[in-house]
């Protein structure tokens, strides 16, 4: 599955972008970062799983739909992309891309952006839109999470694990796990709890068909909704709200890649 991204919302500079991803003036223009070599082949395995492998030189994707590749390249959630062409969703791709020398993850994602522009004809612009989301507040009777002191942030016991209908937090701050909750709900969440500590908690709910952040089944298929679970188990409350967000708006995207 696609690796988890730590950043919840990446802010972008406003402006219209043409076919070239880096639309700059002639005085400041420079060549966009590119892989030294890149093979793109349609995946014919029929498998639904997505697999990837990164090392200092290599970026490999197997069975990746274009939406996944665009989200990864720009560090976006699905709700941060507008005007997505459904016609491209029928294909999955195997990509074997290699940089000229060792490169960071950030540099590889910039190269992936270039690859999408040059091989799939990606054109886009960015604009602010109001999207449906939630604000998270403390419920009437206060939080029920266990606050922990003197957390060793280097400990392997600290962090978030998640599955379908389940999020487990160990010594985490609010921002550490809201990204996972946002992914489960498929929309942005604004933290207004005012909670600044670190907490242990277990959140379990019975997800509906729109809430699928894992292929596994929920621990209790007859459990509470995510809204009831957050209030009952954590002492928090989700309230619907329109959230202003800068969107990546797709102007053009080819269904098939150009030849290698």
Image (cartoon, rainbow, N blue to C red):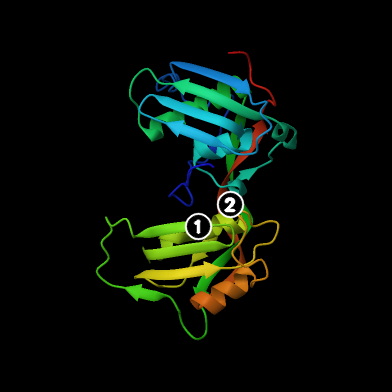
Point out the residue furthest to the top here.
260
Characterize the local packing of mark 1: few (<14), some (14-19) or many (20 or more) Cα atoms within 10 angstroms. Answer: some
**Residue under numbered circle 1:** 162
Q: Quadrant of the N terminus?
A: top right
Q: Point out residue 155 in the picture as x, y percentages from the top left corner.
A: 28, 57
Tell me which label, 2 or 1, sits earlier in the chain. 1
Point out the residue furthest to the bottom here.
141
Quarter-of-image position of residue 146:
bottom left
**Residue under numbered circle 2:** 214
Q: Point out residue 140 in the picture as x, y percentages from the top left corner.
A: 52, 85
Q: Point out residue 210 in the picture as x, y percentages from the top left corner.
A: 68, 56
Q: Nearer the viewer, residue 244 or 189?
A: 189
Q: Say which residue appears at 63% left-offset and 55% top-offset.
A: 131
Helix, strand or loop status at disc 1: strand
Quarter-of-image position of residue 148:
bottom left
Characterize the local packing of mark 2: few (<14), some (14-19) or many (20 or more) Cα atoms within 10 angstroms. Answer: some
**Label 2 to label 1: alpha-carbon separation:** 8 Å
Q: Nearer the viewer, residue 223 or 6?
A: 223
Q: Nearer the viewer, residue 219 or 64?
A: 219
Q: Is residue 136 visible?
A: yes
Q: Say which residue appears at 64% left-offset and 70% top-offset.
A: 225
Q: Is 83 placed above or below 165 here?
A: above
Q: Say which residue appears at 54% left-offset and 24% top-offset.
A: 95
């Amino acid at each position: 599955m696609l690796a988890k991204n730590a950043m919840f919302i990446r802010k972008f500079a406003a402006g219209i972008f043409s076919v070239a991803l880096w639309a700059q003036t002639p005085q400041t223009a420079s060549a966009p970062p590119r892989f030294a070599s890149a093979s793109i082949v349609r995946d014919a395995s029929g498998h639904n799983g997505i697999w990837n492998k990164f090392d200092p030189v290599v970026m490999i994707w197997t069975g990746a739909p274009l939406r996944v590749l665009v989200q990864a390249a720009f560090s976006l959630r699905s709700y941060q992309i507008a005007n997505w062409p459904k016609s491209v969703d029928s294909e999955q791709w195997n990509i074997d891309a290699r940089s000229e020398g060792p490169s960071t993850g950030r540099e590889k994602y910039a190269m992936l952006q270039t690859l999408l522009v040059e091989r799939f004809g990606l054109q886009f612009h960015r604009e602010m839109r109001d999207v449906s989301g939630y604000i998270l507040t403390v419920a009437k009777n206060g939080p029920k999470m266990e606050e922990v002191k003197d957390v060793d942030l280097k400990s392997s016991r600290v962090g978030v694990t998640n599955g379908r209908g389940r999020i487990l937090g160990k010594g985490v701050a609010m921002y550490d796990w809201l990204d996972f909750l946002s992914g489960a709900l498929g929309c942005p969440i604004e933290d207004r709890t005012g909670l600044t500590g670190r907490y242990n908690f277990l959140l379990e709910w019975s997800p509906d068909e729109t809430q699928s952040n894992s292929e596994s089944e929920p621990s209790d298929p007859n459990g509470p909704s995510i809204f009831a679970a957050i209030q009952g188990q954590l002492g928090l409350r989700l309230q619907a709200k329109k959230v202003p967000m800068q969107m990546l708006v797709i102007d053009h995207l080819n269904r098939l890649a150009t030849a290698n």
